[in-house]
Image (cartoon, helix red, strand yellow):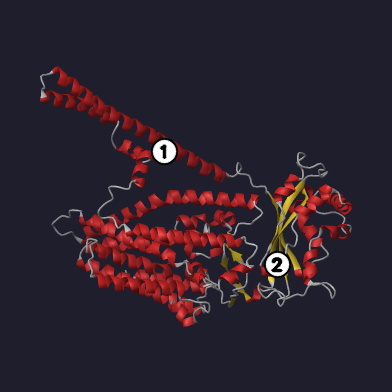
Amino acid sequence: MLLVPLFVMWCCKRSVAAEQQVKHTYNSSDLSYLSNGIQFPVSESEVVSLLEHGGENVTQQQWFAGLYDHHKWKLALDRVDEVDGIGCKRDMQVYLEELRNGTMWAVKMFDASGRYPGQFHFGNDYWLGSKTLCNELTNPETNREIPPFAVQFYVAKVRININEEATPVVSKTRQLNLGECLPKSCGANGVKRLLALDLSHGASVTIVGVRKVPGDYSLLEDFKVHLVGGATLTAVIIVAVSTLVDVARIKRKKRKIKDAETESNNNCRQSNINVNGSTDAILSSQQKEGKKQRQFSGIPLRILLAFSAIGNSKKILALENVSLDAIKCIHGLRFLSIAWIILVHTYLEIFAVADNKSMRLITEREFAYQTIANASFSVDTFFFISGLLVTLTYFRTDSKIERPKREETTCQSLQSSTSSFLILLTYRLFRLTPAYLFVLGLNEIIMRYLHSESVFSPAIIDHISCTSYWWRNILYINNFYPQKEFCMLWSWYIANDTQFYIITSFLLVIAVRGPSHLKFASIACGTLMLTSWVTTFVIAMKFDYVVRVEEPFALFDQLYDKPWLRIGPYLVGISMGYLLFRKDCKIAMPPIVAVIGWTLSLACLGSLVYGVGRQGLVIPTSAFY
């Protein structure tokens, strides 16, 4: 068992060694390298040199206001023979000429394109215009004048280098999202060349890429759509058939009871109050129905009824008949933790597409913002609950098994333990993997669709990474790879939880073999906990990790999603699960002890979530934290 912590240390060492020895610059005001609300470190070698804008008589605000002004494109367009795309230059010349003449359809095209809206120095990176209004230009019901060519909305990513002194709030390298309503004949490559021809930007602007919105992605042509759709249709059919069978079964049962009561009443009227006659009638009816019922019962029927919407709804929504062994407070922990997680992720997702990113810097000064910044502890609640329930359930189940009185041989014990471990592992994989696969496929489809249809680029790159790296999720090892190669970013939790479940199952099948085996499992848990602490401390010190409110996801690849950081709460849950089993979930303590315990617990939780402060923690303290 000591090989397990050694293996964890080896994985950690391998992960750390694989990292390039690059000193990272963390800037709390860097708002341009945000993905899904996460600020990623930018190496010093990647920071573009500072460039000044404009001439002596042009202020920076005037330069921004004139950036990508279509009125200035005619001179640049005349200098080239042709723009990428058949008919692009011709259509652009018509558009620019009519725009100069004030023709309404051309004015509306320009008006639907993105321009400098203000607040650039406060984090507004979206100059999008309106895709809907651009597409509406060709609608004869709402426009008297229609462009003589088809129009298309494009979104360009533009990297701008600005004067650092002029924008102390944000980084000196910014990426804009620029919307353009232009002729469809130009295509994405043609628009990219047109933007590069803009005479106003000079050497301080780089066109990263252009895409048309909507793009070429088609749901009907995507094989994964048919795969996920087929799985969904199959599931719906199975649930529908199961529900209909369950309804027929319930009606038959009610009819049987009603017929038995009717037959009993008839027998009572025909006899001289023959008590046995009533009983015989009921028994006779039950025997007939029972024989008929057995023809449709058995394992196949039970498997089919497992998918019944009626049966499952009754179990899931039932408020009565709660098991006496249930730990009801766990439901409260789940609710509060999931509400916390939803709050935080809602904030991060909104911030990823916000046009007032500097408000985050203002909000971070508030004491209550630490609820958002230090929300990683909310996930630890679920790790704790998982460890507790797995351990408690296994010990309870094992205690009900009658074991042979004669002592097992070593071979028999090993065979029994291996069988138990494989059963636990198979149960977990079959219960989780099908639904996990379905969600992975659905997530990739949604990301592809959003990337094609929305002017906002997805904050995560699942539409790219999932095609290449989905197999890592199915093997539950995706948390060992860099974040940029993740398929479904938040799936790191499932990978960790499954890895912890495998370790716990191995320890549990050993622990139930006897007192000496239980002692060995306890020592192994303690060793894993100690290994987790040491590994986390070493990595934090190696990378000079500093806990700060502004950087909650620093060292994401090295620490945040790794099992050597996350296993601690799970191990605490294992210990608590065994304690509750030994005490039969009946722990009595004096009121004063309960008050002191609650006070210390809340103080500890409060110090973890609200104890970082605006200044953050120094390096050694951060490593312990």
Specify few, some or many for label 2: CA neighbours under 10 Å numbering under 14, 14-19, or 20 or more: many
- Choose the circle earlier in sequence order: 1 or 2: 2
> As shown in the figure, which amino acid type bears the numbered disc 1?
Val
Q: Quadrant of the N terminus?
A: bottom left
Q: Quadrant of the C terminus?
A: bottom left
Q: Position of residue 462 (x, y in %)?
A: 56, 56
> As shown in the figure, which amino acid type bears the numbered disc 2?
Phe
* Image quadrant in which you'd find residue 137: top right
Q: Which mark is residue 120?
A: 2
Q: Residue at x 41, y 38 (%)?
A: 239
Query: Is label 2 in a helix, a strand or a loop?
Result: helix
Specify few, some or many for label 1: CA neighbours under 10 Å numbering under 14, 14-19, or 20 or more: some
Q: Residue furthest top?
A: 270
Q: Position of residue 248 (x, y in %)?
A: 34, 30
Task: Please say whether residue 563 is visible from this viewpoint.
Answer: yes
Q: Position of residue 609 (x, y in %)?
A: 45, 71
Label 1 vs label 2, nearer the camera = 2
Q: Position of residue 201 (x, y in %)?
A: 79, 66
Q: Residue at x 42, y 35 (%)?
A: 240
Q: Which mark is residue 250?
A: none
Q: Nearer the viewer, residue 340 or 52?
A: 340
Q: Residue at x 50, y 62 (%)?
A: 344
Q: Is residue 525 above or below residue 450?
A: below
Gap in angstroms between the C-alphas marked 1 and 2? 53 Å
Q: Is residue 613 above or below residue 485?
A: below
For label 1, the residue is 239
* Image quadrant in which you'd find residue 288: top left
Query: Is label 1 in a helix, a strand or a loop?
Result: helix
Q: Are marks 1 and 2 in contact (CB under 8 Å)?
A: no
Q: How many marks?
A: 2
